[in-house]
């Protein structure tokens, strides 16, 4: 069912808090901004790594552009999905057994929206996802509790329509489900409790001007940021598809990205994390069904060491059509480099600290027909209420 790829949210916590109101997550980002370790004189930011490029390249930092690409791509995809999430996160949805649908004005780019929380078949496998049918994650037959056992939680489904022209002509824009509801920060505590929870969503946008045919952009995400036993373990997958209807090549560009953070200790230590970035891009070329126009990227590093391991394989015929345009750098496989100099080092260094990407698989090359880059079929063209 939905979010199957990363839906294992870990062993049950004794109790999970259920808020009285919930919003959509503002972000599903797995932060990769801190890219060098305390051992290098304090963690340096991605922004600082960009600033030191003039010093890195003269000393032979030939892997600089490939290293930075992973951080840039992550920033860009989060900005893209964050556009609609940021607007929806401003909603306060009542969590109770009677809220089966919801209507709000001026939400997505100032448009009115309608949300249906009923159960449906999100992933097209012929079975509904087992959602409660309301905003309460334990069921719709009794008062929603303030706490529940993790094992008693059920998904909350949603399908969203918006009215782009304000004329009452609603269209499908977003569908998804929340396996674990997001948590907002409690301003009364010094900690930041913000957590997007566990879930999955798909979005479809159509852009058209008087002079051009419609251009269709679809994107989505599977995310798991809630594991009571390992709270620092995070994973987010992103899917992005551009379809051209103008006859220009490429006819489609489909990106698949996964960013993962794993704690290295049984007792999670925020200063000892393994970060992995994977990305694939597949382009379809008109009248060339067997053409190879692909890109594969792997990157892995630890926050307590100043080293990076990666693979960069760019065979895109139209690199400028990619969502994140790959740098013009030679292809390489399983390189080990120092982060702060971007200079290659002995592969054994990366092997010794467990970041070598030799056995890290490439992500699948997706087609524009893949369910992961499309709204579900079980999504009526017009609102259900």
Image (cartoon, helix red, strand yellow):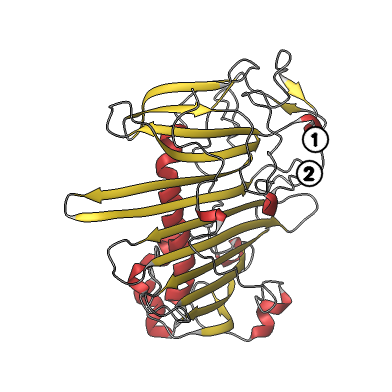
* Residue at (53% x, 72% y) in the render: 339
Residue 281 place in picture, x, y as percent: 48, 69
Farthest residue to the top: give it.
143
Foreground residue, 198 or 41?
A: 198
Front-most of residues 102 and 320: 102
With respect to residue 88, does 64 lie above or below?
A: below
**46 left or right of 318 in image:** right
Mark 2 secondary-structure assignment: loop
Q: Secondary structure at mark 1?
A: loop
- Graded by Cα atoms within 10 Å as few (under 14), some (14 to 19) or many (20 or more), the crowding at tag 1 reads few
Which of the 4 image quadrants contains residue 183? top right
Foreground: 33 or 142? 142
Callout count: 2
Image vertical order of residue 316 relative to residue 23, above or below: below
Sequence-earlier tag: 1 or 2: 1
Return the x and y of residue 280 as percentages of the image width and height. 52, 69
Question: Residue 375: x and y, percent?
Answer: 50, 47
Compared to 51, does 350 lie above or below?
A: below
Q: Is residue 206 left or right of residue 172?
A: left
Asked if residue 137 lies left or right of residue 240, the reply is right
Residue 347's tag is none
Residue at 28%, 28% (x, y): give it: 166
Residue found 70% across the figure and 17% down from its top: 144
- What separation in Å lies between label 1 and label 2 (alpha carbons)? 7 Å
Mark 2 Cα-neighbour bin, 10 Å: few <14, some 14–19, many ≥20: some
Which residue is identified by label 2?
A: 229
Task: Find out whether the residues at labels 1 and 2 contact each other: C-beta distance under 8 Å.
Answer: yes
Task: Identify the residue under disc 1.
Answer: 13
């Amino acid at each position: 069912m939905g979010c199957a790829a990363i839906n294992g949210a870990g062993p049950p916590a004794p109790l999970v808090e259920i808020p009285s109101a919930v919003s959509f997550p503002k972000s599903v980002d797995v932060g990769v901004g801190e890219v060098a370790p305390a051992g290098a004189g304090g963690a340096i930011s991605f922004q600082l790594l960009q600033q030191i490029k003039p010093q890195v390249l003269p000393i032979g930092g030939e892997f600089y552009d490939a290293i930075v690409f992973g951080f840039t791509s992550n920033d860009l995809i989060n900005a893209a999905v964050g556009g609609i999430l940021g607007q929806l996160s401003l909603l306060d949805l009542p969590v109770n057994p009677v809220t089966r649908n919801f209507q709000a004005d001026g939400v997505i780019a100032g448009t009115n929206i309608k949300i249906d929380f009923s159960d449906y078949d999100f992933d097209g496998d012929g079975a509904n996802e087992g959602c409660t049918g309301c905003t309460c994650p334990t069921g719709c037959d009794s008062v929603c509790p303030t706490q529940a056992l993790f094992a008693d939680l059920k998904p909350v489904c949603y399908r969203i329509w918006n009215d782009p022209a304000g004329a009452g002509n609603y269209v499908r824009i977003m569908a998804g489900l929340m396996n674990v509801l997001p948590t907002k920060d409690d301003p009364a505590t010094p900690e930041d409790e913000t957590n997007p929870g566990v879930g999955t969503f798909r979005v479809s946008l159509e852009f058209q001007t008087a002079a051009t045919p419609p251009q269709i952009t679809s994107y989505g995400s599977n995310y798991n940021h809630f594991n009571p036993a390992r709270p620092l373990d995070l994973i987010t997958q992103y899917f992005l598809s551009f379809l051209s209807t103008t006859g220009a090549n490429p006819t489609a560009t489909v990106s698949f990205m996964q960013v993962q953070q794993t704690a290295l200790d049984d007792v999670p230590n925020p200063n000892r994390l393994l970060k992995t970035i994977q990305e694939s891009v597949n382009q379809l070329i008109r009248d060339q069904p067997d053409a190879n126009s692909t890109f594969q990227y792997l990157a892995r590093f630890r926050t307590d060491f100043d080293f990076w391991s990666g693979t960069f394989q760019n065979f895109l015929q139209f690199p400028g059509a990619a969502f994140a345009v790959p740098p013009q750098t030679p292809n390489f496989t399983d390189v080990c480099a120092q982060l702060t100099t971007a200079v290659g080092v002995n592969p054994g260094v990366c092997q010794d600290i467990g970041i070598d990407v030799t056995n890290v698989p490439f992500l699948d090359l997706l087609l524009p027909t893949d369910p992961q880059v499309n709204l579900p079929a079980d999504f009526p063209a017009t609102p259900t209420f």
